[in-house]
Each structure stands twice: as C-alpha cells, then as structure tokens.
Image: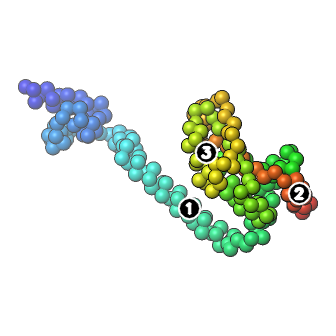
Amino acid sequence: MARQKEKIQAIKLRLEGKSYSEIKEALKISKGTLSAWLQEYPLSSHRIKELRDNNPKRIENFRNTMLKKREARFDKSYEKILKKITPIAKRDLFISGFFLYWAEGTKTTKATVSLSNTDPAMLKFFIQWLALLGVEKQRLKIHLHLYSDMNIKKTVNFWSEQLKIPTSQFRKPYVKNSKEADIIRKGRFGYGTCNVIYENAPLYREVLMGIKYLQNCF
C-alpha cells in the first residue's frame, strides 16, 4: 500500500514536469524503480530542454568553457600586441611617463610633482619614471587616502611593501568618514588611494614643459 502511494506521488511529480533526479530527491526512490514506474510518462521536448538549460552543472560547465575561450582570446591579443611594442627602450619609458603625468599627474600644486592612484602597478611605474628624471626613492613622500572601516596599519604596510618604500616616508593618512564597503568595488583594488609626492620646483617646471612639448606635437 505504501509503495503504491509512492508510485502515485511519483507520477504526480512527473506530470508536473519533474526530472528523475528531482523525484528521486523528493521521494528517496531509486532511479531504476522510477524508470519502471514512469516509462509511460515521458517529458515533453520543451520540458527536457528547460531542464537541460537550467541544470546547475551544465551551466557551470558552460561558464567555464566561455571563460576559457575568453582567456584564450585575450592570450592571443596579448601575444599579438607583444610583438608590436617590444622591446621597450629607456626612451620609451621616459616619454610614456610624460603622457601618464599629462593624464593623471597633479598640475595645480606648484613645486610638487605627484600622482595619485589606486593601482599599485601605476605608481610603481611612476616611481621608476621619476628615477629616470634623477629622483632618488628616499626623497619621496607617500600620502594615503583611506576609509574609516579600513585597517590603517595593514593598508600602510601593503603600500610600503608594494612600492618598496619604508613607512617612515609615509605621511599621516587622511581617513574619510565614509566606508570603503559602501562604495562599488568593481574595478577597485581595495587599498584606498595612494599619492606619491616629490617636492621640487625645478623638476615641476621640467615636467610641465615636457607636457607642453607633447601638446605642441598634435
């Protein structure tokens, strides 16, 4: 009697469009038994397509496949552009720094050459560019703009390690009252904004004149 009741429940679930796996999970009945009970109750082709398309494992496999294809396309593009831009000479880096400063550098604070960014790689390049201009790393100052919910000491140490600059060259961080967690994180690095500063009037003028030359080239 109990078995017959289970069969009726299984047929009811099948008529509702449930898969063998879903019915098995609900009633704790083997697939072999369900196959015998439900062979006269096939799903429609439309329902089969729905189950296949909504299968979590299939969706995950599809996403992984698409991710691999996307990565392969980027790898191909990387190899292509690599052939066009390498090797990079010191002069290329020197000129690139002026373009970077033209776009991102501070130009309103007189006698100060500085650049703020959230990307450590960007600031590492900026420091290397300053070295090409004759600036020693120990003469740089670092000023961080952080948020109230951040671990200040941990973040300072992060930037110190990334830039290879001791914390003794860091000014007291500016901490905003707002929380970093409340800001959309997409495209962010999660360590606030770092400002690399070099106070020197002659270099400030030199950098601005380098940018002026580039402006006149176009």
Mark before the other along the chain sequence, 1 or 3: 1
Quickly name the residue at label 3.
156
The span from disc 1 to disc 3 (Cα, nearest Å) is 37 Å
Q: Which of 41 and 104 is in front in this view?
A: 104
Quick one: label 1 or label 2, which is nearer the N terminus? 1
Q: Picture quarter containing residue 94?
A: bottom right
State the mark number for residue 202.
2
Amino acid carrying label 1: it is Arg
Tell me the quarter of the picture where residue 36 sits: top left
User: Looking at the image, is mark 1 or mark 2 nearer the viewer?
Assistant: 2
Residue 44 seen by the camera: yes
Q: Give x and y (percent) for residue 4.
A: 11, 28
Q: Measure the alpha-carbon separation of dots 1 and 2.
A: 46 Å
Image quadrant occupied by the C terminus: bottom right
Q: Which amino acid does label 3 sit on?
A: Val
Which residue does the numbered mark 1 point to in the structure image? Answer: 73
Q: How crowded is mark 2: few (under 14 residues within 10 Å), some or many (20 or more)?
A: few
